[in-house]
Amino acid sequence: MSKEHSRYRWFVVVVFFFFMLLHQTDKLMIGSLQMQISNDFNLNNKQWGLINSGALIVATFLYPIWGYLYDRYSRTKLLSLASFVWGATTWLNAIVRSFGGFLVTRASTGIDDSSYPGLYTLIADYFGPNLRGKIYGILQLAQPLGYLIGMILALIVAPRIGGWRAIFYITGSLGLVIAVLIYFGVKEMPRGKAEPEFENMAEMQTFKFSWAEAREIFKKKTMWFIFLQGFAGVFPWNVITFFFFAYLEKERGYDAKSILITMAPVILILASGYFVGGALGDFAFKYTNKGRIIVSSIGVLMGALFMYLAITTPIEATNQFFILMCITALFMPLSSANVIATVYDVTVPEVRSTAQATEYFIENAGAAFAPIITGLLADAYDLKTAILLICTAAWLLCFFFYLGAIFTIDQDSHDLRTQMAERAKAL
């Protein structure tokens, strides 16, 4: 690999990091804006859940379409289009003045939320299997950091510059800027270029999407366990994203300053957990194909345990609550980068976007209803009960699904490496 190519691929990582950082800021700050938006439109918990479920439902149905398009056409051009859609729909969301209009335009922001499979598969063609966990961990730092930036914009900046609509105008405009940067600055890479079997080859075979290979995704047992954990695993993330700030304010009595002081360190620790998880997964993967799955199973089990301990902490024990949330935040993201890398450890390059999109489709098929279910439980009981039940139950299910994958990953990974070796010999 030339030094120029090595430097350029890190430039691509930086561009995609800022794409994800600003996009996640735009997407996730709505949780911090719950009280402001709810007051504007006079919303209850059920209506608030419906607003957030709308975008998730739209993203769910579009995942297979995005995945197919990424495997057939230029991923860089499609990512640029996704960034443009992000900017345009966020502007529309800021313009409307009725609950119905806000519901519809917020749902439209889900169009670009399903665009990440192309980004991850393009990165997989710049970096080989032994580095992918760490790279995905770096990229996924953008999610909690975006959450933190969104929280600062919502709680501190928005009240000073005209409210939540002004913030949406800013983040929407940034989406348009990033669209231009990706379109002109990021190069497409041949699918499978970074696979070990093709590492030193001057010429690359062009691998094209085929329905036969797409069907093979569903014959891999590991993928079924990945699908199942995905269905359950995103429930807690959506519950925390859309309801945790309201829980802190309404049921634990925190004001805006206390929320920021408490959650900023928690989110920074959460951010570190993405990279730690990816790095641990890469390290363990060097010794066993089961490595990424083992790291993931530890993450969800410990996350469930410490979330339970945190939520059941008495309200007056603020220091104890803070410490337990920090520990929870470290374990929560350990599986994230490893799940993406595992998908690519068992699927061929030309259908990886489809495989990733299918996994996200199944995730969101369940998680899209998480805000509605949480809202109903919160109205029937309280937010504490809703958060506790959904988070602990979902993560425990994920633990058992990961145990299943431990028994299938070796065979599926071996099959992929054999197939790649046969292709390399044929060139």
Image (cartoon, grey):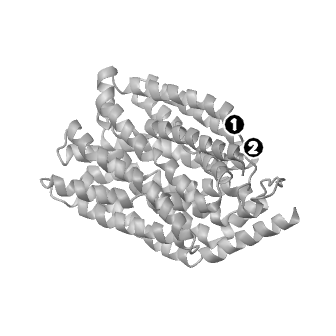
Image coords of residue 405 (percent x, y): 55, 73
| Mark identifier at residue 73 | 2
**Would residue 41 be visible to someone looking at this image?**
yes
Q: Is residue 28 left or right of residue 3?
A: left
Taking the image as shown, residue 182 lies to the left or right of residue 35, namely right
Secondary structure of the residue carrying tag 1 is helix
Q: Is residue 4 above or below residue 321?
A: above
Vertical comparison of 157 with 412: above or below:
above
Q: Amino acid at mark 2?
A: Tyr
Return the residue found at the far left.
316
Residue drawn where x is 35% and y is 63% of the image: 303
Q: Depth check: 124 or 235 in front?
A: 124
149 to 419, vertically: above or below: above
Q: Which residue matches tag 1?
A: 77
Residue at 49% over, 41% down: 55
Q: Determine contact: label 2, label 1, CB under 8 Å.
A: yes
Identified at 73% across, 56% down, the residue is 192
> Which picture quadrant has residue 254?
top left
Q: Callout 1: few (<14), some (14-19), or many (20+) C-alpha neighbours within 10 Å?
A: some
